[in-house]
Amino acid sequence: MDMTTMTATTGLATTDLATATGRATVQRRASYVPPNWFAAVMGTGIIAIAAHSLPWQPAGLAEVATVFWLLACTVFAAVLVATVRHWVRDPEIARGHHAHRVVAHFYGAVPMAIMTVGTSTMVVGATVIGRDLALGIDVVCWVIGTIGGVFTAVAIPYRHLIIGRPAVGAAFGGWLMPVVPPMVSASAAAVLTAQLPAGWASHGVMAIGGVMFVLAALASLPIMGVLAARLRTGDVGAAHMIPTWWIVLGPLGQSVTAACLLAHVSPQVVAAPMAGTLHSFAVGYGLTVWVAATLWIVVAARLTARTLRSGMPFAMTWWSFTFPLGTYVTGSSALALTVGGTVFEVVAVVGFTVLVVAWSVVAVRTLRGVVSRELLRAP
């Protein structure tokens, strides 16, 4: 090979290398902000709500609730800006999220994050920004979250579970994410109803809350059945997906919260006989599902402990440890309010303590991943 040919070959090789390196650089710099980032908002805001609902209110707890409410608002703003930037910079990647068989289900986190911010603003932030402004924010968040939640509860399962017809071996806890928002809307409706004057608005909000409760319950049951079927096979999925088994706790704890809170506010909206019926339903349903949720915590904890011993890499799925546990805390507090009993008060306080510890671990690991940009790289 003469010198000219060698030079040309070397030049081509260099050009190819530069092109490949350039493509790799572009790929590394591509933004990647899937909808499961909104789970960080849910996991942070639920601490503020859970702190406010605890039956025991020691000194300093109100300040803790305020701090987590402010954190939830800050994280929500940051994730929203990052999401918009992601759609502008990398629209092809962003549009691909809704077609992904795993990522798509986490679109349910968006309406839940919005309603978590709204409810926490109402119950905690009102002391900071004033009741009227907090009520306005809560109404807007509830309306947007309810509409978005109905859409995710219908559209995503239809596309990925009915048309897609995945095998039982593909089931994971994230399948519940799109169908839980209406249940969050139901409990948020109860909080909102208590703040509205008697009249058509409070009646309408509570009625919608009841419809959302039924929708979420009916949509969750078949998915839970499939998840139970996969669990019986012994195949629980990859290590980094194990935290999603905690999501099963979400519809359980949230439905207990919603049933009890709706019953609690019903006397100011409906006639006494109907209010009595709702109270009886809340007691019977709440106690039954609370026991099921407690048993599920044992199952999920055993799966997590076993996986941690063999190695469970950090991923955004770790936020599944937070919001579902938070709903168990709020459900326990709501039962303490509805039926009384020291056991529910103790469980709520212990659960809240575990929740704060879990949030601290996950938040620190997430912050570390953001600083290193490990969590922001497109796969």
Image (cartoon, grey):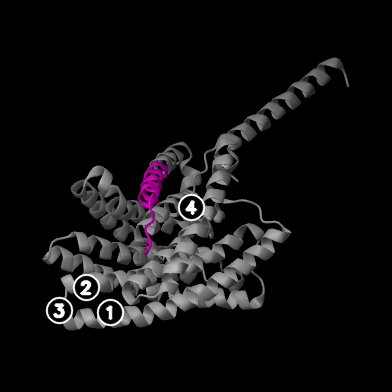
Q: Quadrant of the N terminus?
A: top right
Q: Does the residue at mark 3 contact the one at mark 1 (Cβ under 8 Å)?
A: no
Between the C-alphas of marks 2 and 1, the distance is: 8 Å
Q: Nearer the viewer, residue 210 or 356?
A: 356
Query: Does the residue at mark 2 contact the one at mark 1 (Cβ under 8 Å)?
Result: yes
Indicate left or right for 121 with 174 as reference. left
Give amino acid for label 2.
Ser
Does the stretch in magenta take in 295?
Answer: no
Disc 1 packing (10 Å; few <14; some 14–19; many ≥20): many
Which mark identifies residue 266?
A: 2
Q: For marks 3 and 2, give the CA distance.
A: 8 Å
Q: Which residue is mark 1?
A: 279
- Rendered location of residue 178, percent (x, y): 42, 63
> What residue would you read off at disc 3?
271
Kind of residue indicated by mark 4:
Asn
Residue with the most extreme top position: 3
Tag 1: amino acid? His
Of labels 3 and 4, earlier in sequence is 4
Name the N-terminal-most of marks 3 and 2: 2
Residue 36's label in the rendered image is 4
Dominant secondary structure (helix, strand or loop) of the stretch shown in magenta: helix
CB atoms of marks 3 and 2 within 8 Å: no
- Asked whether 230 or 78 is in front, the reply is 78
Q: CA distance from mark 4 to mark 1?
A: 35 Å
Residues under labels 3 and 1: Cα distance? 12 Å
> What are the residue bounds of the magenta stretch?
54-76
Query: From mark 2 to mark 4, how far is it between C-alphas?
Result: 34 Å
Quarter of the image for residue 307 reads bottom right
Q: Secondary structure at mark 3?
A: loop
Q: Earlier in the sequence, mark 4 or mark 1?
A: 4
